[in-house]
Image (tube, grey):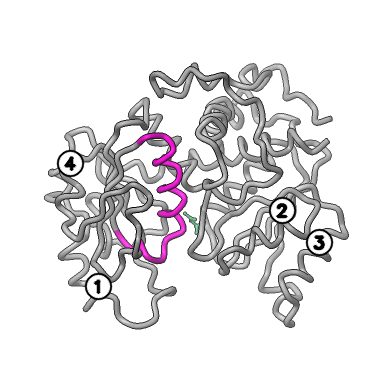
Amino acid sequence: MIETPSPQASALQGTPSPASASGQPGQAAAPPVALRARHLLGIESLSPEEIVLILDTAEAMKEVGSRTVKKVPALRGRTVVNLFFEPSTRTRTSFEIAEKRLSADTLSIAVATSSVTKGETLVDTALNLEAMSPDMIVMRHASSGAAHLLAQICRARIINAGDGMHEHPTQALLDAFTIRQHKKRIAGLKVAIIGDLLHSRVLRSNLHLLGKLGANVWVSAPRTLIPPGIERFGVTATTRVEDAIADADVVMMLRIQMERMQGHFFPSLREYFTLYGLTKERLALARPDAIVMHPGPMNRGVEIASDVADGPASVILEQVSNGVAVRMAVLYLLAGGLD
Ligand code: CP
């Protein structure tokens, strides 16, 4: 059995009640007490109730790491391996902090100095790590579906920290947590997502999540960066960025992912900024209390102007802070099924 967290962390003594903190009026269904799946591979496979459970658990986790409650013993004796095959600042660091605050034994594999550089396959790397009996593996990989592959061959719980252009579930969860913190709800909000939609795993996870929680989602980009068939997610797609931003409650900017682009998707970065960059003038089209989000890393002067990124509407660094609590919640809930 995992240990119950310390008495000081009173909010962690039981599973928090989604009905009390969801901010979703009219959602009074009995809350689930655990995640159904053994792994967190994507938002697609989560129910709305499971998403709310994670957000509410993260609410309780915010208390851990404060001066009064430095850490809790929820994952004491558990080993978590962080396996990042792609660069990361926010996700990797926040997972490491989250694991330490839950008292897990953690290790981070530096892929650049591992046997991967000698040609070892992902499967062999995973099987060798498995042989050392970790309880959980947090993985980022450049290939879509890499986390699903690991989940098929590993006994350890797998947490997808971003797989290619497929999903980045903990990013969408921390985005939802941040939106809920500011707006007290997600259902009915107009959320405009603008940028490199085609290559974005953050977009896909957010489309699943925001759709499941009832947001009114608009997406905007040059036609070449709009994935064909995106309307099947129930979103409104437009090449006119002003239409997406008009009266939005949330404006979420996505990075232009040059490293994933082969060929030219738009004439120049300067022209992209002129037509799609979030400037003060464009932001003025949104609701007066709109918040500006970005998963990072940002390209200032490409998808967002510096004075907007650092301005009063920006919650970009709050997203980063909330990433720790949300990742603690995911680790905690998945660990609940370890025994
Ligand atoms: N948002 C995000 O995934 O950032 P990192 O690449 O720094 O982890």
The numbered mark, 2 or 1, whose residue comes first in the sequence reads: 2
Identify the residue under disc 3. Answer: 129
Q: Nearer the viewer, residue 214 or 114?
A: 214
Q: Alpha-carbon distance for marks 2 and 3?
A: 9 Å
Q: Earlier in the sequence, mark 4 or mark 3?
A: 3
Residue at image position (34%, 83%) is 263
Local secondary structure at mark 1: helix
Q: Which residues are magenta?
A: 195-214
Label 1 and label 4: CA atoms lie apart by 24 Å
Q: Which tag is nearer the camera, tag 1 or tag 4?
A: 4
Are discs 2 and 3 less than 8 Å apart at CB?
Answer: yes
Determine whether the residue tagged by mark 3 lies in a helix, strand or loop.
Answer: helix
Q: Residue 39 at what x, y percent from top left? A: 68, 47
Q: Quadrant of residue 146?
A: bottom right
Of circles 2 and 1, which is in front? 2
Residue at mark 2 to residue at mark 4: CA–CA distance: 40 Å
Is 5 one of the magenta-colored residues? no
Callout 1 crowding tier (Cα within 10 Å): few <14, some 14–19, many ≥20: some
Residue picked out by circle 2: 137
Count residues near mark 2 (Cα–Cα under 10 Å), then give few for <14, some for 14-19, many for 20+. Answer: many
Residue 269 is labelled as: 1
User: Where is residue 73 shown, x and y percent of the image?
Assistant: 75, 30
Q: Which residue is mark 4?
A: 286
Q: Using a 10 Å C-alpha cutoff, classify the residue at mark 3 as few (fewer than 14 neighbours), some (14 to 19) or many (20 or more).
A: some
Q: Give me the residue at 17% from left, 39% from top.
A: 247
Rendering coords of residue 159 (x, y %): 65, 50
Query: Residue 195, which numbered label?
Result: none
Q: Amino acid at mark 1?
A: Leu
Question: Gap in Å between the C-alphas at discs 2 and 1?
Answer: 37 Å
